[in-house]
Each structure stands twice: as structure tokens, then as C-alpha cells.
Image: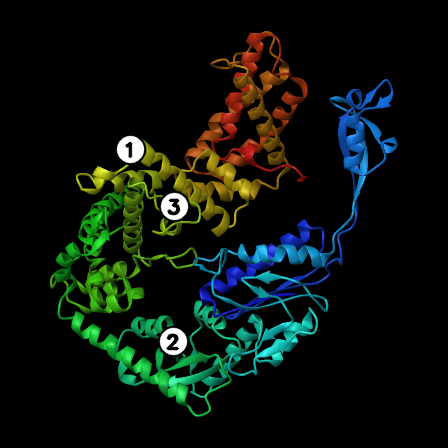
Amino acid sequence: MLEIGCEEIPARMIDAASQELRERVAALLSRERLAAGEIACFDTPRRLAVLAAGISAAQADITEQVTGPSVNVAYKDGQPTPAAHAFAKKAGVDVSRLEKIKTAKGEYLAAKVTKKGRSAAEILAENLSKEISSIYWPKNMYWRKANERFVRPVRWLVAMLDGDTIPLEFDGIWAGRISRGHKILSDGGVTISRAGSSYVDALRAAKVLGRAEREQQIRKALDSATRTIPGARWREDKLLLDTVVNLTEFPSVILGGFDPQFLALPEEVLVTVMRDHQKYFAVEDADHKLLPHFLAVLNTDGDRDSLIRHGNERVLRARFSDARFFWATDQKRSLLERLELLRHVTFQKDMGSYYDKTRRVQRLCSWLSEIIKQSGIAVRAGVIHKAACLAKTDLTTEMVKEFTELQGIVGGLYARAQKLDPSLPEATRFAIADAIYDHYKPESTEDEVPRSMEGAVLSIGDKADTIAGMFALGLMPSGSKDPFALRRQANAIVKVIDKYKLPLRPNDMMRDARAGYQGSEAEKKFVEDAKFDEAASIFFHERLEFYLKDVRGYAYDVVKAVLAADAEDVVDALARAEAVKQVLHMPEFLAIGAACKRMRNILRQAEEKRIAPAATFEYLPDSAHEEKNLATYIEVYGPRVEGHRKKKEYSDALMLLSTARQPVDAFFDKVMVMVEDEKLRANRLALLRTLLKEFSTIADFSEIVTEGKT
């Protein structure tokens, strides 16, 4: 058992760090041959702990064969030379026990050496501190030693193997068997008698619960508090629940209230203040309308004198009063009047103001709208144009300055509340407001996409402008660093294109977005067009691969196969991936996948040897019966497959391709491609090249993993 006790860890960092510590300990035990059973995590705001069961007391002894000098060097006139004696001494055996083994390089001396296993306590004491210091944190603190870093100062360590303490040191703190209980509800020190379940029991007695217990206790307390209000229920919020779980060690819940007059404010404002600023849960009725109550999670066992409740109510009343003041103040100036103020709001130091960005997004959205309209999809370009004009104006409002989480949302609310243009029908004004409200969506792969086509186009245009500008400046994401969240925005573009089945190609979109910077000051600092195109293409290829695999759940080899054929069209790639997934279980396609690998290898080897295929396949007198049959098959079925492919009838095309198994198998069973006859060889290479091209129009089947499949 290992426990790292420290000052409060930021809630958002606990889960990832706890999981990483578990993985590091598991890897250490595996690497050092200390086979472990179940490895469990235990984390709270003040500690990260790992409990590993079934650890071996020591490594098993291992015997391995060590190779020494060659026999020619080791013996002279039948007697061992100094080289043989040196090798025997190094191996720890008598020279007479050396063996002779045959290798590809000749005959060599060898010795069997037994390496005695080390104890688990010795290995853990030596390595655990390294694993602790290697945990990744978004932000670290350094102290005492330059090489020791952690998210917060470490205050205690507990490291035990069964009932014994492991002599472990980190940051000047030596491990012992004394943990600490709840900061308020316990007396402090908690003696751990033995690694295992007794650790969890001892902490529970000291008012410290594990993550699952804390979540269960919070849920029960939320339910219990809400039942005191007839017909009410607390609003489920997974992210907020995860946060408060990681803010507490022994949680309880209090019910508070606020003046019902604040319900006149938009729900989004009230919920944001409660959730993001105060970590309160909202309370609603059966129709999902907010009630004038809130639920606060405490890191203690209750609020007997209601002092905490009164304090939270006062704080919330002040925050709501601020929000009401900001709302009233902002209405004195319409969003249209705020457009000019965007000239003084910097978007990025090299890319101008938000006013400049607004104009670029308007132009880009006009181009995107035209492409969508030409494909027969209904879209209101005028709504998008007006929404793009006003989308960023809420950045100048007092509400967004105070509650930055509401950017976009406030713009949509204000556009709905204000009379932007008396000539606009109300339905059109609401459509504009909805597009503004949604244009930051989706903010993650789990988030919902914009509700309307207009919101979808504005969302894509806004994000594409940002990505294109950053890439043109050479500010691409690198490794884990992505300060402008470009990956997240690209993921959002791919998701919106998929959900609305839009005929938008990311690479073309990037070029159009980059063209919007033409003539600007930023353009003087841009990288070359070729570098931009290449970087943007690779970037969106990676994002589409991520979306297909991690979001849509397609197998890794299916994704590779589909994108190897074409990664330009998001909707088309998804359709091809689905078609390939449906036929992948068929033996015919497993055989075709193996054949494609073979064809690609043959063609690659020919290229390496500078052997060129013929321009086209010809029926030569020396052509084998099987290769003529295969060529005939391509001539007959190739156009039919292509017809299905052009109509995007990928399942039909693949079913037709499955009939190629018999002629392909017969060809490889009977025909040698790399023959001595140059003309015949070039002709057969041309046939393979043509066949591989036919197979690869929908997916590159050579990427499909066939090993282990039947």
C-alpha cells in the first residue's frame, strides 16, 4: 500500500493523477516480475493511494545463457586463453563449466548464469519515489530539491508491504504507517496496521471515504434534501458531481433558498452562477423549471446551526444581484451598436481584433452556405450572415466580462430579447439568436451540436477561421501542448459535418479560411502555402481518424483502411467505414485483405529493385490461364463496382468485390509474378497494380488485420 498525503489537490486533476499512479505501480510490478493481482485506487483531495494485492515477496531466480567469445579466440592448442578465463570469471563459473554453442556467426562459448531475485521491499523502496515524481500534472510546484516536483507540498507518506513499512523517501518525507483522517472531523493521525482493506477501514473510521462511497453519500444526501420540497428534484449534472466528489472527504448536503424574483433572469445565467461559481446543484420542478432553491455539498458532517446555509445564501444573493444589474445595464446598448466595440477587443496579437474576425467569418460562412445550397441542402444564408455579424458582440457586455462561461449564450439571449431590426420577422430573429447561442458548440465530443443548420455553419466557420489563422502563423499543436484548443475545435468541425451530413471538405475549407486573411497585417507573418496545406491536411486526417475510432467506435484497422483510400470527405469516409464494418466478418474479405498485402509487398519489392510494371495488362501468348481469368474478371466487374462507388452504394460495391476471392486465390496459387521473362513479369505486375487499385477505391484492404481471424 502506498499513500501520498499532501495539501488539497485541485479537483480537476485528481482522477487523471490517481489513474496514472495506479498504472505506474502496475507497470513497475510487472517490469520487476512481482506479479500482482488486483490493483485499486483510493483518492481524496488530500491523498492519492494505491493498494496492490498478490505481490510476490521476492523476484524468482532466473537462469539465462550468456554468450562469450568465439571458440577460436577462447582456446589455443586446446587450452583456455585469457579471454576464456575472463569470461568464466565474469559469468561466475569455473572455466571447465563453459559450454560451446553454435550460432549464425560460428561456434561461441556460453555459460548458464543464475540471477538471484531481489526482495519486493528492496525494489519498491528503490523505485516508488521515481514513480511519484513522474506523475504528470498540468501545473507543478517545486521545492527543496530541483528534481522533486508535485502538484502540492507532500505532508506525509505511508508505504507498507503487508505489515512492514517500506523505507521510502520523497521530498524529504520518510514513509511510515501514520496516515491522516478528515481535517475537521478526526483527531488527526491514523495508524495503519497492515496494507489491505484495513487501510480503507481505518480511514473510514477517521471520516475519510473512498470516491465511490463519497459519490453514493452525496447522491443520497441530495435526494434526501430535495424530498423536503414537494414535487422537486435536483438537476443531474455529472461534471458538477465529479467536481464536488473530488472536493470532499466526508460529504454532506444542505438545502438553501433565494428570492423567487431572481427567477426572472434567464435560467442559463442562474445555473451558471450556481454551478460554475458556487458549485451548487440547481433544483427544478417536474416540468424542468427552476425553483428558488439550491443544494450545496459540504466537506463536513452537517450544518446544525444553519450558519453555513445562511452564509451560502448571502453569497448567492450577491452574485444574482450582480447578474441582474449586468443584464439591465447591457440592455441599454443593442448588439448592433456593440459591433464597433469589437475593434478594441483583441482576438490574437498577430491576427487582429474580433471585428476583423467577424468580417472573415461572415465571408467564410457565405462560401460554406453556397457549397451546401448547391448540394441541395436547405440553408438560410441571410440568417447565418446576420448571426455571424453579431456572434462575438457579447464579449463587450458586462455579463460576459463577469461570467465568461456564458459567451455565445448571452449573445443568443440578448438577440432574442432585443429588437435587432424592426423589419425582421420574429421567427427570423429567433433563428439568428439560436445560431449565436449555439455557435460555440460542440465544446467536446460529448457535447451536443448546434440545433439548426444555420448554427452548424456558423460554428464551423468560426472554428475554421481560428484554426486556419493559427496554422498560417505556424502555431500548430505540438505533443500534449495545444494552448488554443485547436484539436478540440477541429473535432467539433468533424462532428458537426457528420451530424448534418454536410458536403464540406476540411482541406478545402482551410484554404478558403486562409484566403480570408488576404491583405491583412497577419498575412505578412504567415508560413508558405505549401507548408500550410500539408500541416492542415495532416491535422484533419488525425482528427478524422480520432473521430472514427474514439467517438464512432470503428476498429483501428477499419479506420486505417478507409482513410488510406480517401480522407478528404468526412461524410463519405463514415459511409465507407460503416460498409467495411458490415462485411469485415466475411471470409472472402479476410482473404482479400491478405491478398492485398501480398500484392502491395510484391509491387513495393519490384519498385525497390527498379522493376517497372507494364503500362497496361495484355493477353500474351505465355500468359497463364489464371491470370487471363483474373484480367477478364477485372474487365467485367470493375465498371460495375465503379458504378456502385460513384452512387455511394458501398455495401453493394463491396459485396461485388467479394466475388473476386476465387480468381485471386487461383492466381496466387498457380502463377509466379517475379519470373525471369521481363515482359511477362512487367505484364503481371501491371495486372496486380490494376487489381489493387480496384480493391482500394473504397478501402485499402491491405490495412485490415487478418492474423488470428478465421
Looking at the rendered structure, the kind of residue marked 2 is His
Mark 3–mark 1 CB contact (< 8 Å): no
**235 up-or-down from 107: above or below:** below
Q: Secondary structure at mark 1?
A: loop
The total number of labels drawn is 3
Q: Residue at x 20, y 76 (%)?
A: 325
Q: Nearer the viewer, mark 1 or mark 2?
A: 1
Q: Could you say which quadrant of the image residue 532 lies in?
A: top left
Sequence-first tag of 3 and 1: 3
Residue 585: x %, y % from top left: 61, 42
Most foreground residue, 487 or 232: 487
Q: Earlier in the sequence, mark 3 or mark 2?
A: 2
User: Horizontal placement of 672 versus 367: left or right?
Assistant: right
In the shown orientation, is residue 360 left or right of residue 187? left
User: In this image, 650 relative to 394: left or right?
Assistant: right
Residue under pointer 1: 528
User: Which residue is denoted by mark 2 in the rendering?
Assistant: 288
Q: Which mark is residue 272?
A: none
Q: Amino acid at mark 3?
A: Pro
Q: How dense is the environment of label 2, judged by Cα within 10 Å: few (below 14), some, or many (20 and up)? A: few
Q: Is residue 580 visible?
A: no
Give the vertical position of 643 relative to 169 (above or below).
Answer: above
Going by the numbered disc 1, the residue's amino acid type is Glu
Q: Tell me which numbered mark, 1 or 2, is placed earlier along the sequence.
A: 2
Identity of the residue drawn at 53% across and 75% down = 249
Q: CA distance from mark 1 to mark 2?
A: 53 Å
- Taking the spot 62% from the left edge, 73% from the top edge, the residue there is 178
- Mark sitting on residue 477: 3
Q: Secondary structure at mark 3?
A: loop
